[in-house]
Amino acid sequence: SQQGEEDPQALSIQEGENATMNCSYKTSINNLQWYRQNSGRGLVHLILIRSNEREKHSGRLRVTLDTSKKSSSLLITASRAADTASYFCATDGGRGGSNYKLTFGKGTLLTVNP
Amino acid sequence: NAGVTQTPKFRVLKTGQSMTLLCAQDMNHEYMYWYRQDPGMGLRLIHYSVGEGTTAKGEVPDGYNVSRLKKQNFLLGLESAAPSQTSVYFCASRPVRVGSEQYFGPGTRLTVT
């Protein structure tokens, strides 16, 4: 079964606006990662946040993690048309689980209109 | 560095035919993975390997076999293809370090008719 579930499934915004995507998961984790996939391509890692971190920044990306709610959000500020892609969260096994494997959500399709 | 490469990029099979997908990585990663991606389903793990000569089942292993004879290569085999195996297949690798990211190949689009 899927560990992570992104919300919304699809998001359409104008260039310059901020985009927020959410991820919920079911069991404890060690790390949560966000990946991006351009149409027809493989996934590319964006950012990792550890279970003892609450917020992390990387350029125009801001990730938050609330382990009490088992949820994370990815904020892309000042979006550009080139940010159009699908975004996936991925979680590892957590306490007693596997550190080898990631479980991916179904993704959020972000469309940034010029 | 080429990173993670996959061969072939596209393939059409008839039901019952067999084929092997090849994944190669030049980053000396210990862990390698095969996923399939279907519309609305996200990525699902088929098999993975934590080192040369080792393999393990993922979430959807039925109908697939894998081999990791060399550290840099991870092969995915379909012995008797079925239309349900029509999908895009992605290979990924990562180093041993806990919490490290996975590096993905460009994908193989497989159609089984």
Image (cartoon, coloured by chain):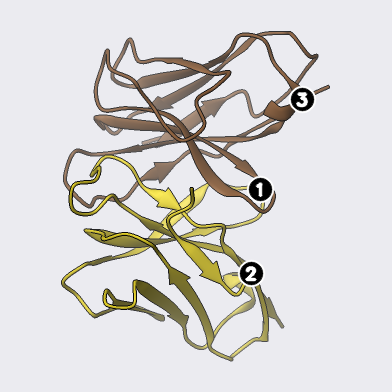
Q: Secondary structure at mark 3?
A: helix
Q: Residues within 10 Å of mark 2 (few under 14, many from 20)?
A: some
Q: Which mark is residue A9?
A: 2
Q: Position of residue A56 (x, y in %)?
A: 27, 78
Horizontal relation, residue A23 to residue A8: left or right: left
Give the CA separation, mark 2 to mark 3.
26 Å
Q: Are marks 2 and 1 on the same chain?
A: yes
Q: Nearer the viewer, mark 2 or mark 1?
A: 2
Residue in the foreground of this view, choosing between A97 and A61: A97
Q: Amino acid at mark 2?
A: Gln
Q: Quadrant of the C terminus of chain A?
A: bottom right
Q: Amino acid at mark 1?
A: Gly
For the point 27% across and 77% down, the residue is A68
Q: Residues within 10 Å of mark 3 (few under 14, many from 20)?
A: some
For the point 27% across and 74% down, the residue is A67
Q: Which chain is brown?
A: B
Please give the residue where the numbered disc 3 appears in the rendered image: B83
Q: Position of residue A75 (x, y in %)?
A: 45, 82
Q: Which mark is residue B16?
A: none
Q: Secondary structure at mark 2?
A: loop
Horizontal relation, residue A96 to residue A110: left or right: left
Q: Amino acid at mark 3?
A: Pro
Which comes sooner in the sequence, label 2 or label 1? Answer: 2
The colour of chain A is yellow
Q: Which mark is residue A40?
A: 1
Horizontal relation, residue B78 to residue B52: left or right: right
Q: Chain of mark 3?
A: B
Q: Position of residue A54 (x, y in %)?
A: 23, 80
Q: Are marks 2 and 1 in contact (CB under 8 Å)?
A: no
Horizontal relation, residue B78 to residue A28: left or right: right
For the point 48% across and 52% down, the residue is A2
